[in-house]
Amino acid sequence: MRSHLLNDTTAERYRSSVTEGVERVAAQLAAASRPFTGVTTESLASRIDSVDLDEPLHDTLDALDELEELYLRDAVYAHHPRHLAHLHSPAVIPAVLGEAVLTGVNSCLDTWDRSAGATLIERRLVDWTAGRIGLGQDADGVFTSGGAQSDLQALLLARDAAAERDPAAHRDPATLRVFASEAGHAGARRAAELLGLGEDAVVVIPTDRNKRMQTVALARALERCRRDDLSPMAVVASAGTADFGSIDPLPEVAALCAQYGTWLHVDAAYGCGLLASRRNRHLIDGIERADSVTVDFHKSFFQPVSSSALLVRDRAALSRTTQDRTAQDRTTQDRTTQDRTPDQAGKSLQRDRRFDALKLWMTLRVMGANGIGHLFDEVCELATEGWRRLVADPRYDVVAEPQLSTLTFRYIPAAICAPSAIDRANLYARKALFASGDAVVAGAKVGDRQFLKFTLLNPETTVDDITAVLDLIADHAEQYLGENLDRAC
């Protein structure tokens, strides 16, 4: 069994195995005529359940043959131009190379003596990102597993800051309030629940017709919070909501946070691609005033999952939150050098962490920030053209003009139908399209109504692809309405 360990005696075996695996993936990517085969859960489950995990194949090529049947052949391929569903971008080649390197070396970012240069590269990328945001000389941050972890840690920092500012909040966390827009409150609500803040902790702020937080409503909510002797812990502003790609008015929100002494967290998991844009960077002006920022490079920097980070304005706030862990980790270090040893472990909610920063490093070194920004600008421009097509198409109702690369819309039949029937027709169209494998689209709720969503993160997608998928959606929706005419319309 030791022959399967990666060491100097198995270097050639490792090389040939990885090469074969990469070639098979490349072949599947090239051969995929659709983003999905339409395979059913039952079919895949029966094949996977039949595998006896206690009986190994003892051969890498045999394992790859099996994997091709169980996974590669029927995977959902985000690289396909008609994968229009989720905040899941195709990965650029330099990032895939970085993934292969970091997995082979298997560095762990928990302590310096397990990572060496990996720690320095991550720190350099944290500084680079904080500089792009404009957080100042005292900024810091850490790579995370994704936006949910970043948002949770940001609100943990905000809770600690509120407790320092208001001793009553420390004694009674039920007095703390978090403000988030109705278009982006789900993540804030999950984080508040995990932090034990209570079900009333999140105050939902209404949005305007473009799904941006209404600052007048935010000001009223903050004033009401003060009047009721509650503590305004944090405002969570969005720089790219998941369902609409909407960006809250960050300068106005920042001004209100300064007025009320409230922590400002900007969730830029989606919109962080604008940090590399030369054309649209202005859309997130005001982000530099945030106390913390979430970025997901695997959304709009075209990185493999996962590649995310939390950035903070005040490095002291980040270290205070995990100071007990820092002290514990340092007991394993040489006390004569601990002050000079770079420490990332004490900044993270995780212990063992992958060297995910390497993927972004390789991308920047090969493509540069302008290359990434150009790709993101392309998909944003595509969304604008798609919006024009939707507005001109009488079959569809579109929610808002996109600021980023999301289009939220729904099919509206020519015949007069009940709103619930239109909901069912759109749901049916989405499921039927996925089952056919011809395209993958997402769903979204707008109020109580069911809408569909294109999240355009593939620069290979064209306006013709959008038009073709819209025709397919209309066909499926009409099929449903035709078969259910009596109770639908």
Image (cartoon, rainbow, N blue to C red):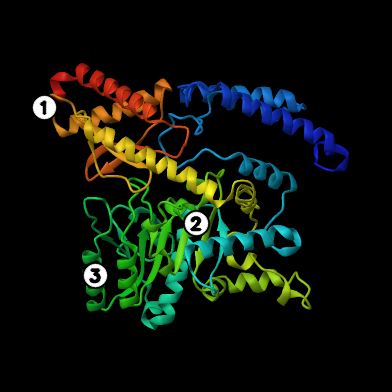
55 or 341: nearer the viewer: 341
- Secondary-structure class at tag 2: helix
Question: For the residues carrying marks 3 and 2, which lies nearer the camera in this image?
Answer: 3
Return the residue at label 1: 416
Return the residue at label 3: 219
Residue type at tag 2? Gln
90 or 116: nearer the viewer: 90
Question: For the residues carrying marks 1 and 2, which lies nearer the camera in this image?
Answer: 1
Relative to 225, 336 lies left or right: right
Residue type at tag 1? Ile
Numbered marks: total: 3
Relative to 292, 442 lies left or right: left
Q: Residue at x 51, y 74 (%)?
A: 314
Q: CA distance from mark 3 to mark 2?
A: 28 Å
**Which mark is first along the chain, 2 or 1?**
2
Q: CA distance from mark 3 to mark 1?
A: 41 Å
331 or 427: nearer the viewer: 427
Q: Give the vertical position of 450 relative to 144 (above or below).
A: above
The image quadrant of residue 452 is top left
Q: Give the vertical position of 121 relative to 467 (above or below).
A: below
- Secondary-structure class at tag 1: loop
Q: Residue furthest right?
A: 9
Instruction: Check the picture and name the quadrant holding the N terminus.
Output: top right
342 or 203: nearer the viewer: 342
Question: Residue 103: x, y in percent?
Answer: 69, 45
Q: Estimate how packed mark 2 is, as few (under 14), some (14 to 19) or many (20 or more) residues with alpha carbons within 10 Å.
A: many
Residue type at tag 3? Ala
Give the label on residue 149, or none: 2
Question: Residue 416: x, y in percent?
Answer: 11, 27
Q: Residue at x 44, y 81 (%)?
A: 164
Question: Residue 431: x, y in percent?
Answer: 35, 27
